[in-house]
Amino acid sequence: MAELTSFERVMRVLDRREPDRIPHFEWLFARNVREAICPGCTSHNDFAVRMGHDAVLVGPDFQKEQVGPTQWRSEWGYVNDYGNQEHGVEVDCPIQSMSDFEAYSPPDPLAPGRYDTVEWAVKEFKGDKAIGVHLNDVFSIPRALMGMENLLMTIALDSELIRGLVDMSVDINLAMAKEVAARGVDFVWTGDDYACNTGPMMSPDHFRELFYPGLCRVIGGFRELGLPVIKHTDGDLWPIIDMIIDSGISCLDPIDPQAGMDLAEVKEKYGDRVALKGNVDCAQTLSYATVDEVIAETKEVIRKGGPGGGFILSSSNSIHASVKPENYMAMLDTLKEFGAYPLSL
């Protein structure tokens, strides 16, 4: 096969077809690891371009103001503490009750400047790199607005409030999806985590009753706009994985090895319906193992996920601040050596 562009490569995979080689990109890349590998890079996407990643990743532009040394208040009204990471944790949330929700107004999806970064990416990379835009589905916005502990309590105690939050999340993300689709992005990825290492953060019955209908509506809306959807969620998904697949996603990420999610088993059961992305262990292997161990695990991930196409190789979540730069490079170099089709492992 002739060499494809990164755009063509990713879109073939999201259509569950075999490309010229297995593509690669990461959702998040910690600044300290970026700088160690590529000194002077200015951003995640600058790093991605310099390293030859197959996608650039953007999102709608939301304002935020600094309210502490490592804390920022989002336009949504919650406060994130970032510490030394690229991804924050909510420490102050605007909704604690139904009365708070009834008084709450989310950001305007049509606000001026909302899609400046999206428009830049399309102008700069359209047809070359695959352009992914981060939207949400049904869990992250309710979690951010309520806080995790309060949200989980509310799932059991106030289903009406949960349904209201889910509907609001679906409505605003579909409104934003219309805007980014019109501007020419290539795919959507949603980062709403439903599970931890021991299982989903709510019962399968609660997921089916409160979250699954909204998930089907938002994923269906993205797909109707011509946007394939990569669904990210860590953790042990086995109790709810059928609902996630049935919602209509195009690709499931990251098939979390720390939670007992085996890439080969997921590929065997669902590879005829969805593409897969993952899953070199970033909690242990990329952070603490030797280079030789990273090479061996990367080869095994290629063996499990690569046959027949429909696979993107990446870490099992992100390249966080504890990942050894040399281990990331070992993963990338191994993919370059062994990731071309026909696979030769």
Image: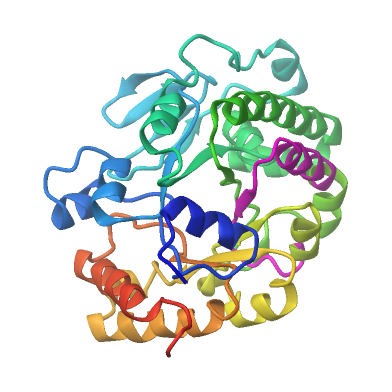
At x 39%, y 67%, the residue is 282
Instruction: State which region is magenta.
Output: 212-240
At x 26%, y 42%, the residue is 46
At x 21%, y 37%, the residue is 42
At x 39%, y 26%, the residue is 120
Whether residue 30 is visible here, answered yes or no, is no
Q: Quadrant of the C terminus?
A: bottom left
Decide which of 168, 49 is in the foreground and name it. Answer: 49
Name which quarter of the figure residue 105 lies in: top right
Q: How many marks?
A: 0
Whether residue 217 is visible here, answered yes or no, is yes
Q: Is 156 contained in the magenta span? A: no
Q: Is 237 contained in the magenta span? A: yes
Name which quarter of the figure residue 308 lies in: bottom right
**Residue 211 in picture, x, y percent from top left:** 79, 44
Name which quarter of the figure residue 146 lies in: top right
**Residue 142 in picture, x, y percent from top left:** 66, 34
